[in-house]
Amino acid sequence: MAEQGKNIPEQLLLNWPVNEKFAQGNFLASYSNEKAVNWIDSWPDWQRGGEHFHCLIIFGPKGCGKTHLCHVWQEISNAQLLSADALDKGDFLSTENLVYVLEDIDQYIDNIETQHSLLHLYNWIREQGGYLLLTAGARPKSWPLSLKDLSSRLLATETVEIKAPDDELLKAVINKQFSDRQITVGDDVVNYLVARTERSFEAVRQMVQKIDDLSRMEKKKITIASARKAMENWDEV
């Protein structure tokens, strides 16, 4: 059986369905993301220094849970996800919605037209009493901003970082990654991985995918031995 498993073409593994669960109850809270979670939970009572604010920026590395938090916030606020194209077209002006999410804004904010559009949205949200959630990979001061009015507003905006995970969160993330693939693994495997995994959410995602791929190719249960083999093969790439 193991030999047959090894003949599974790799391309058949690439599109294996992963059921990512974005519901509020599935979010994994820890000290590394508690500030971001607290702001999401406290909406619409966003206050700083006794003053109400309308825009929040959450930043952190790829795979740290920013998208999941956006989905949670959309659940509780009915926020609308705004694409880069919709932002540039000013689509937000043609709806009655006053709550928006823009993900990975630092990936396309270098465009001056987009900067003008975001400034327009930012001012419009404040004037209308709406709310805006922005996510990014880095803090605003490192964004390629050339529009001074926008830069000053974003630098003054409440900003919160999602940090690298601690052991407990890393265990929870590993379990969730396997669970999203309908896989249950033993605590011994999880503890083994925690002790040897890079402290990043993206590294965990890639590692679990490699272990899952090897398990299905060999048609074997995931054990410490198979996890070790997958990680050794990964290191050799």
Image: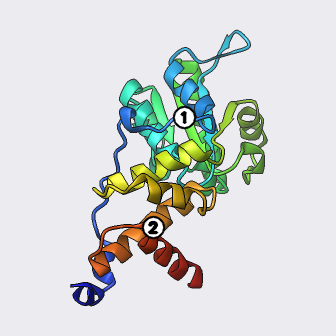
Q: Secondary structure at mark 2?
A: helix
Q: Point out the image quarter for the C terminus.
A: bottom right
Quarter of the image for residue 36 reads top right
Identify the residue position indicated by label 1 in the image: 133
Q: Amino acid at mark 2?
A: Ile
Q: Position of residue 231 (x, y in %)?
A: 52, 74
Q: Of label 1 and label 2, which has the lower sequence position?
A: 1
Q: Position of residue 39 (x, y in %)?
A: 57, 25
Q: Is residue 122 something one can see in this rendering?
A: no
From this viewpoint, which residue is outermost toward the top? 50
Q: Residue at x 53, y 53 (%)?
A: 63
Left or right side of 234 for 52: right
Left or right side of 150 for 217: left
Identify the residue position indicated by label 2 in the image: 224
Q: Nearer the viewer, mark 1 or mark 2?
A: 2
Q: Are marks 1 and 2 in contact (CB under 8 Å)?
A: no
Q: Position of residue 23 (x, y in %)?
A: 35, 37
Q: Point out the image quarter for the N terminus.
A: bottom left
Of the pair 101 and 127, the residue shown nearer to us: 101
Q: Residues within 10 Å of mark 1 (few under 14, many from 20)?
A: many
Of the pair 13 and 123, the residue shown nearer to us: 13
Quarter of the image for residue 216 reads bottom left
Q: Secondary structure at mark 1?
A: strand
Q: Position of residue 76 (x, y in %)?
A: 39, 25
Label placed on residue 205 = none
- From what the image shows, is residue 188 above or below residue 136? below
Q: Amino acid at mark 1?
A: Leu
Q: Residue at x 58, y 85 (%)?
A: 236
Q: Residue at x 62, y 51 (%)?
A: 113
Left or right side of 154 for 11: left
Q: Residue at x 46, y 28 (%)?
A: 99
For the residues labelled 1 and 2, the Cα–Cα distance comes to: 41 Å
